Amino acid sequence: MVGHPVASARVGRGAAMTAASNRPLTAADAHAWGNDGRARWYSSSSGRIELAITLEDAEAAYHQGQCDKDVAELARVPYVADQLAGIDAATLSAELEQCAAWDAEELADHAQNIQRILWLACGDIGERAACGEES
């Protein structure tokens, strides 16, 4: 994954909001929003967790092979990190428990849960884009 030039953000469309703080995105929150300048939205199955991620970033963190390092790098990008910081640990654990992919001991690790939800969000965004769906 290539570094993210935060200073070159192209935001200001007025519609994009950070999920963590419900405030408009600014240049400090995000880098250029992908190829078409738009965030793609992910909403968990319960709707309690929402993330806005560019298609370019989603595809960089969800692909064939090991994704762990790419997901960890994306989690440090300021516009993503800001959103992830606002996710409540209990809400996240309960959301991931619905996937039935991790046991209670694994779900007790909030840092790993953050990586898991980001990976799931990137997969959802990428797969919907591949099917021609807007998000």
Image (spheres, rainbow, N blue to C red):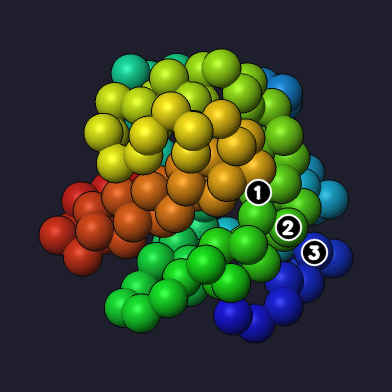
State the image coordinates of residue 101 (x, y, percent, origin top left): 29, 41
Q: Nearer the viewer, mark 1 or mark 3?
A: 1
Judged from this view, the residue extending furthest toward the left is 131
Residue at image position (24%, 59%) is: 127
- Tags 2 and 3 touching, CB below 8 Å: no
Please rate how many residues cluster around mark 3, counting C-alpha atoms within 10 Å: few if below 14, some from 14 to 19, many from 20. Answer: some
Q: CA distance from mark 2 to mark 3?
A: 12 Å
Residue indicated by mark 3 = 6
Q: For the C terminus, which image quadrant?
A: top left
Relative to 16, does residue 75 appear above or below in the rendering? below
**Mark 3 secondary-structure assignment:** helix
Asked if the residue under mark 2 is in contact with the one under mark 1, i.e. CB atoms within 8 Å, the reply is: yes
Eyeballing the image, is 56 above or below 102? below
Q: Nearer the viewer, residue 55 or 63?
A: 63
Residue 2: % across, % down: 65, 82
The amino acid type of the residue labelled 2 equals Arg
- Numbered disc 2: secondary structure: loop
Q: Secondary structure at mark 1?
A: helix
Which residue matches tag 1?
80
Q: Quadrant of the N terminus?
A: bottom right
Residue 30 visible somewhere in the drawing: no
Going from the N terminus, do you reach mark 2 or mark 3 first? Answer: 3
Q: Residues within 10 Å of mark 1 (few under 14, many from 20)?
A: many
Q: Quadrant of residue 45?
A: top left
At label 1, which amino acid type do we have?
A: Val
Q: Position of residue 117 (x, y in %)?
A: 47, 42
Q: Is residue 107 left or right of residue 26?
A: left
Q: Which residue is mark 2?
A: 76
Q: Given the image, on which type of amino acid does mark 3 rest?
A: Val
